[in-house]
Image: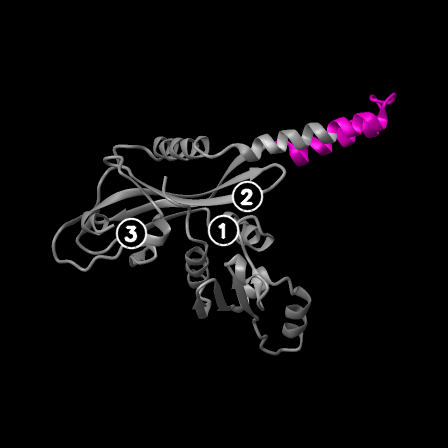
Amino acid sequence: MEQQIDLSDFLTSYFETKHCTILSKDEGQIHIQLTEEMDKELMNRPFYWHYIKKIGREGEPQALRLITDKEKASEPGEWIHFGSPRLHQIINKLTEKERYTRLFEEVRTSENTPLYPWLVVNIKISYRGVQHRDEIFSVGLQLLHGHMALNMMDYLERIPLDRAISDYCYTLTPMINPKSGFLRIQNVLLQHVQNQDNAWAAASIKQLESEKATLKHFYADELDHPRHVEELEALEKRFKPMITFQVINGGIFYLTASTMNEK
């Protein structure tokens, strides 16, 4: 399976969609001027904005410098990576407000032009154990013939899209319903997970057993003590290997055949 979605491209697309200005984008870092709305959503300054509005002044949204290259994490800015609180915050905002969409490719034509239905789903896979790791995948499935494409968000951001269908265009009826399409995408991602090195899970189980043995020795004759049971549950929650899938958002995109042939 191809590499997960590029974090820098994901962030650029996200902030541009939110009408923020990309002040600069160098290798390993991105500098963004936030809008007032995005400052309120991400920067946790409710007291500032309440004060500014009360005195009738225009607020000054902050700029955000995000570092995506671990080797540059010591430079000025905020290191953002899969599993970081900031990325988790952004994904949660997407999940809360923009879970589903329906968009059409903008087409300038004077001839009848069919648009093919694509189910696009952005999914986060989280690996939890001794160490935490996240992956984000953007997968598209054409709902007529079942063709599947990865890194769809990287591709879609280069296509003009609109909520209304263009003149002379019409949509083709799907042969695959979205639910079945989602199951196909899910199966591909499950196969990806099964092909991963499971050393992290083995290490997590080993650490869990070691911690449980230490705890058992500590409580010795009080294994039924409520505190012992509580701490056992905490260890299970912390170290037991677990993989979860979270749908960030998705939608149906109607695209021309020629556009997708260029992919």
Of the image marks 3 and 2, the number of the one nearer the N terminus: 3
Quarter holding residue 172: top left
Tell me the CA gap for discs 3 and 2: 34 Å
Q: Secondary structure at mark 2?
A: strand
To which residue does mark 1 refer? Answer: 94
Decide which of 195, 119 is in the foreground and name it: 195
Please name the residue shown 35% across and 30% down the image: 180
Q: Earlier in the sequence, mark 2 or mark 1?
A: 1
Are the residues flagged by discs 3 and 1 in contact, CB closer than 8 Å? no
Q: From the viewer's perspective, tell me whether residue 218 is left or right of residue 83.
A: right
Q: Can you identify the residue that label 2 sits on?
A: 133
Amino acid type at image mark 3: Phe
Q: Which residues are magenta?
A: 212-240
**Disc 1 marks which amino acid?**
Leu
The local secondary structure at tag 3 comes to strand
Answer with mark 3 or mark 1, whichever residue precedes in sequence.
1
Q: Is residue 150 left or right of residue 72?
A: left
Check disc 2: other Cα within 10 Å, few if <14, some if 14-19, many if 20+: some
Residue 225 is covered by the magenta coloring: yes
Q: Is residue 226 in sight in this rendering?
A: no
Q: Amino acid at mark 2?
A: Arg
Task: Using the rendered image of the protein, determine whether residue 137 is visible from the camera's viewpoint.
Answer: yes
Q: Quadrant of residue 161?
A: bottom left
